[in-house]
Amino acid sequence: MGWLSITNITFGIATAIFYFQLGSVMALQFGAINALISSAYAIVVAGILSTFISYLSAKSGLNVNLLSRGGGFGYIGASLTSLIYASNFIMYCAFEGLILVYALHAFFPHIPIWVYILIFGTVVIPLNWFGIKQLDKLQKWSLPLFFVFLGAAIIMAFIVTPAYTGNVFTYMPEGVQVGGTALLMCMAMHHGIMGLTALIPSDYARFLKPKDIKATLAIGFIPQIFCYGFMGILGIWFGVLLAEPNPGVYIVYLLGAGGALFTLITQLRINVTNIYSSSLSLSNFFENAVKFSPGRRFWVVVSGVAAIILMLGGIVDHLDAALTFQGVVLLSWASILVTDAVFVKKLLKIGPGYYEARQSNLFKWNPVGVTALIVSSVLGTVAAFGFMGPFLESTAAFFAALLAAILTIVIALVTKGAYYIRQEAHDIPAEDHIA
């Protein structure tokens, strides 16, 4: 596929209303200026990680789960990352689905919430049935509708009576200052999602035409600019202007039934990509761990049902804890993949200069990635829950990612790359090598 099609699919991630909510909550709690600074930070860090990982995926034709096999984890070690990856997508499917459920329930309150959950938790399953081509068509035809409704919401926001009449982008809550703890708290909220947005494009960049491989810079950065920049800034504006952090409330307030339809479109766009990525990861895990391979469509159904169960169980009540753990683990994983490619494979020349995904040529476990991920995730989680002081509590995911990078290099040097490859491959073209 061409790079425009790939970028178009990743826009399903970038147009999620969740980014409105992120911007609104940060601005109202910690000030618009801190939210803007943190958004710029998120674009740069997630964009760099995403560009590297998208390039590796396009170069090798492997998604992030298969990249992990030859990128420091071994084939069973990579399966564990697949399970973590899949569980995070299922959680996000539940979070995003509940935004839609509450928005529609606010407009049609006579229908019970559980009915909405069953309907919109189920509808993403057939939308995923035919894979990447179907996703491309869905995102392509729904994107114009998204911009029409978004434009209408912006116009209506200028017309309605605002709750805040000052300069929205200089708004600061009473007692909150620019920088310091407030800025760190905004960055901590961004960390909860940055690892995921950095890793997701690899599921689609693997389909990139060889002649378009340089376009991985666009695939890496454009979605980050849109979700943290455009969507995040609009979230700041809507939230402060209307003094409301929940986009499911203010979009319906601005557009009425159109707001409910707008929410429906955006949340279906993001949730079909959530289910697609989770189905790939679950398929990879069970095929390698227990030799169970019923096919991707089976895991589409499993992912959809699991998301429905989480929604019915009130997963949204545990959003902070879920985002904290997700940010630590996924940012560490992304850091390991990039460090392994750039420093271990490219600069230190440790291990093969290509990515091997076949089990027959790999060890089950590679201590480089597995140890780095476990140690950094455990210590990062401990830090995130305040046991290492307030500074590391706010920067736990960044701390974990930095620690993961250091451990990757150190363990690769100590083991001398002995666990990267069990049998040398001679059938991988030179142009697919990264070192």
Image (spheres, rainbow, N blue to C red):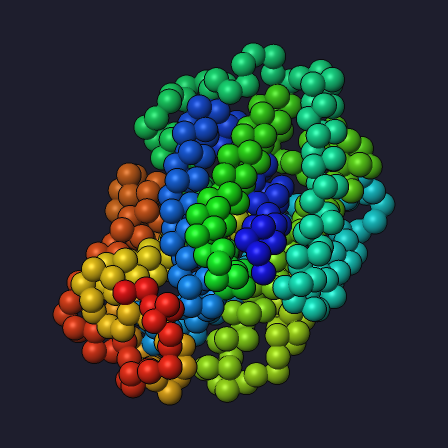
Front in this rendered view, residue 178 or 421 = 421
User: Residue sitting at 83 percent across and 42 percent down?
Assistant: 108
Asked if residue 146 lies left or right of residue 315, the reply is: right
- 177 versus 6 height, above or below: above
User: Residue sitting at 53 percent across and 49 percent down?
Assistant: 319
- 306 versus 95 height, above or below: below
Q: Is residue 336 visible?
A: no
User: Residue sitting at 25 percent across and 69 percent down?
Assistant: 368
Question: Could you tell me residue 41's position as x and y percent?
Answer: 39, 36
Front in this rendered view, residue 273 or 241 = 273
Question: Could you tell me residue 293's position as x and y percent?
Answer: 57, 83
Count the labels in the image.
0
Q: Quadrant of residue 314?
A: bottom right
**Quadrant occupied by the N terminus:** bottom right
Q: Quadrant of residue 121?
A: bottom right
Pick out the residue farthest to the top.
166
Asked if residue 358 lies left or right of residue 262, the reply is: left
